[in-house]
Amino acid sequence: MEHDAHAEAPPPQHVPPTEDATVDDWAREDAEPMTVDSGAPEEGVDEAAPDAAAAADAAPAPPAEGVKEIQSSLQSLELKTNVAAHEDAHEVEDEAGEQKRHLNVVFIGHVDAGKSTAGGQILFLSGQVDDRTIQKYEKEAKDKSRESWYMAYIMDTNEEERAKGKTVEVGRAHFETEHTRFTILDAPGHKSYVPNMISGASQADIGVLVISARKGEFETGYEKGGQTREHVLLAKTLGVAKLVVVINKMDEPTVKWSKERYDEIESKMIPFLKSSGYNVKKDVQFLPISGLLGANMKTRMDKSICSWWDGPCLFEVLDQIEVPLRDPKGPVRMPIIDKYKDMGTVVMGKIESGTIREGDSLLIMPNKSHVKVIGVSLDEKKVRRAGPAENVRVKLSGVEEEDIMTGFVLSSVANPVGAVTEFNAQLQILELLDNAIFTAGYKAVLHIHSVVEECEIVELIEEIDMKKRKDADPKKKKPKRKPLFVKNGAVVVCRIQVNNLICIENFSDFPQLGRFTLRTEGKTVAVGKVVAVPPAGSLTF
Ligand code: GTP
Ligand code: MG
């Protein structure tokens, strides 16, 4: 869940910590720098709580809460209905080329590490919060005997969050650096709200992992039961390609900008990040900050505060970060997260591949409905086209709102997304309920892009020995030994079935449509990636 246009928090769900597992092979080898392509900042696309849509079966889902709000805000939006195709594509491309790129950045880390404080400080430093508001927050925080929490109040906007000092819903805010427009997604650190963190991380391109350097706090966050490890593992699985690790609270009296403390934390984090699948040299950058004081954030470190840090500040690192390319010229893939009627049918979602333009003919899968794009908008702004990573609203003709469900995918006609009822996956088992064993017949709820479906594991195909770092080979038909069961921490290739058609892709082709979590009774029991789908046109193997 997210807020900045307020949404209701889902009931807290307890998610157990992950085991000390390794997933070296989750990394994408094909990472390339992202080209600059974008539109206006997005906001307000509230996702339903992961489990709320769990019964996504035969009947179309009723409109999610908050849709009315969006509807009314959209009523003022004049969506152009007469199609101005792509007369001057070159001109449009040039226009877009001059715009800043857009990245979604999720703030993750253990509870109280300082994510909201750092996020609030970023907004303050980028001039979006005036001194008067800060003074008001200072007073409010003081009245609640939470003096130091005023910066976090910028991101933590609801009463419960402010009273308890804990983020519940994913906070959303925007800021810009020289070359990049950022959407900040401030995830909650508390383990009860891991589903909200999953929803934030699944929209993010990069992550800022906030770690508290305060005596005892790094240790609690890092140990088994802390969220530092669980968040890193989930972020990697959910496609957060790069991590900026900020070692925060460096100003704190138990730290006093100690280089030894910084080095200690960095040296403990590196092996863990490697074992989680991050290439530490290419994908991870460390830096010290004080979110509360704003040190080493917008401007480089003041030497009188910390003499030993010569590296860049947070804004510089974020501005220069290179993320894997999502192909603006690739086939269109936009998982639908919501839909409503507004003189036509409007669908909402994030474009994961390709470009959607006014006038385009597209397919809604798995129903194969032929539709025509009669309007595209980012925020309140009408645009002629939108590319990968943008959260958009697309107005369509040729389909009724009732015939679309959350989890359907808007895709190109020439190269549509496949629709299947089974697939092979490589799973990392995190923690099974009551230490159950994982066998054929295991049932769970599958969360893959905006799809939420009951699923069953029908066959275990091969257990992967992570020590040998052997990856799953989807082409291998007859593995030597099929395991009958596996336990916590295992990595296993298995076949998964669902009752309804779902649109998914191999992780290696479209990572955003090929990675998923399995949840049982509100707990994340496994994370996985799709390694094989049935041949084109078939629902099963
Ligand atoms: P959750 O949302 O509950 O996961 O916490 P969070 O990571 O958002 O932490 P938050 O920003 O709410 O800060 C937690 C506490 O740490 C507050 O008391 C902050 O004032 C304090 N804090 C955050 N950053 C710093 C810092 O740089 N220095 C010091 N000294 N305290 C900090
Ligand atoms: Mg917070």
Image (cartoon, rainbow, N blue to C red):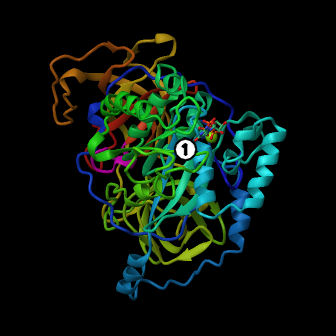
Taking 274 as reference, is 143 left or right? right
Q: Is residue 16 magenta?
A: no
Q: Is residue 509 magenta?
A: yes
For the point 75% across and 39% down, the residue is: 147
Judge whether 193 appears above or below 308 on screen. above
Q: Quadrant of the image for the N terminus?
A: top right
The magenta stretch is 505-514
Judge whether 209 appears above or below 491 on screen. below
Give the image quarter of residue 351.
bottom left
Taking 71 as reference, is 397 left or right? left
Measured from the top left, where is residue 375 in percent x and y? Answer: 54, 74
Q: Amino acid at mark 1?
A: Ser
Give the image quarter of residue 367.
bottom left
Q: Quadrant of the image for the C terminus?
A: top left
Measured from the top left, where is residue 477 in percent x and y? Answer: 16, 30
- The residue carrying mark 1 is 290
Q: Is mark 1 within 8 Å of ligand 1?
A: yes
For the point 74% across and 66% down, the residue is: 72
